[in-house]
Amino acid sequence: MNIFSYNIILTFFYPIILLVGMIRLSFRKESYLSFQQKFFANHDYNKFQKVNIIIHFASIGELNSIKFLLDKLNNEEILLTCSTLSSYILSKKKYPHINIIFLPIDFQWNVKRFISNINVEKILWIDSEIWPNWLNCSKKAKIKNILVNGRLSKKSYTNWIKVKSFSAYLGEKYELIFAKSVEDKDRLYEVFQSEIYYFGNLKFYLDVSLHKVKKNNLCFASIHKAEFEIIIEIISKLDLNLFESIIIIPRHIQFSNDLKMMLGEDLKNKIEIHKKFGESQTIFDNSKIVFMGGSLIRHGGQNPLEALARGCYIVSGEYNDNFRDQYLDLQKLNLASIVNSDTSQISSKINDLVDLNFDNSNLIVNYFRDNKKNLNKMIEMIQQC
């Protein structure tokens, strides 16, 4: 595999990718704005002529991890780019003073059109964003690529290691690579054959606000559509008398009404379905236990740190590979439990946990402090790059 063959393959699949985009548009997973910007690089480029740095986050998970960069790079002219409709809506709400657009998909003509219309010095790629044409074209345009909080899942690592020479070629396109964990540092080095730095995980840069006294409130957070039936089954097996409230936050709020229609009459009055972006912190403040979604299906789980920073006890299904290190650490500290996919056992576990009084404040504070103490070294290197 090389960049030439990659582009031939991508061009061959262009009609299929375009069709998938149109289908996503019809199912409200894309908007006309996202479709135009992602597939055709149609932007108002006059708005971006003073931009120094682009920070790209793919989805909501990555959006929540860029606050540290925005706070520390506050003297720079920054453009935010994203990939999903949900992350765009939430980012517009969180950062109304910053220009936010959808990043053009990695077709060579798309990338070249964007780069030729904008004057930017650095692109900060968050998490697992590895796009060959973006890296290749931006490097040729003397734009510095920096991978921040870089990670590789087992599947991605296996795929990239199969094309080792191509991976090493792409590794040369980065000026700096910062891993989000020691394990990711090792994987990224094997793939890119470049120097990899590890100074901590951006996702730990959160305001820790702990409410010592919590009512018996239960939250199911970031629940994917494929998990709706499983979550309803779990709730139906709970001792509902133990809980003052039960709230479900769908991962994609456009499916909130679909979830509500799936509830039986006996549950409709006992469960609140959250329908707004950006208000999960308030729910976490009032929740004693949070079950994190994306972990009952082979998705890889969702980030538990935002709920943990509000003093919640975390429960996760077994499919949490994307955050495996964090869940294992939290389980050792008795701040979380990992359960298998048996709904009866999950319900029983939650029933057992809800009446416990968790004295976890010092553990949580120390956990966040230890995992973000070296992040300023990353900023120094980005600014000097």
Image (tube, helix red, strand yellow):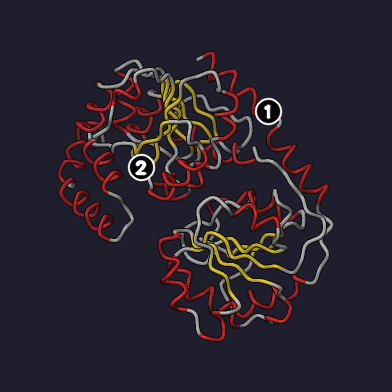
| Residue contact at pointers 1 and 2, CB within 8 angstroms | no
Residue 155 at x, y = what percent? Answer: 43, 50
Q: Could you tell me the amino acid type at mark 1?
A: Asn
In the displayed structure, would residue 111 be above or below residue 17?
above
Is residue 183 positioned above or below 173 on the image?
Answer: below
In three-dimensional space, the C-alpha distance between marks 1 and 2, rounded to whole angstroms, equals: 33 Å
Under tag 1, what secondary structure? loop
Of 326 and 224, which appears nearest the observer? 224
Counting residues from the N terminus, which is met first, the one under dot 1 or under dot 2? 2
Which one is nearer the viewer's eye here, 282 or 67?
A: 282
Instruction: Please state the horizontal and vertical placement of residue 253, each as a whole percent of the image.
Output: 45, 60
> On the picture, is 64 further left or further right than 100?
right
* Mark 1 vs mark 2: in front: 1
Q: Which residue is mark 1?
A: 374
On residue 358, the disc is: none
Residue occupying the point 61% across, 78% down: 270
Image quadrant where residue 186 sits: top right
Could you tell me residue 183's position as x and y percent?
58, 41
For the residue carrying disc 1, how many other residues have a C-alpha within 10 Å: few (<14), some (14-19), or many (20+)? Answer: some
User: Residue at position x 44%, y 22% from top?
Assistant: 53
Crowding at dot 2, Cα within 10 Å, few <14 / some 14-19 / many 20+, comes out as few
Residue 162 - label: 2
In the shown orientation, is residue 164 left or right of residue 286? left
Question: Which one is nearer the viewer's eye here, 189 or 88?
Answer: 88
The structure residue drawn at horizontal position 68% and vertical position 34%, both measured from the top left corner, is 372
Residue at point 54%, 13% (across, down): 384
Q: Secondary structure under badge 2?
A: helix
Mark 2 residue type: Lys
Where's the N terminus, which quadrant?
top left
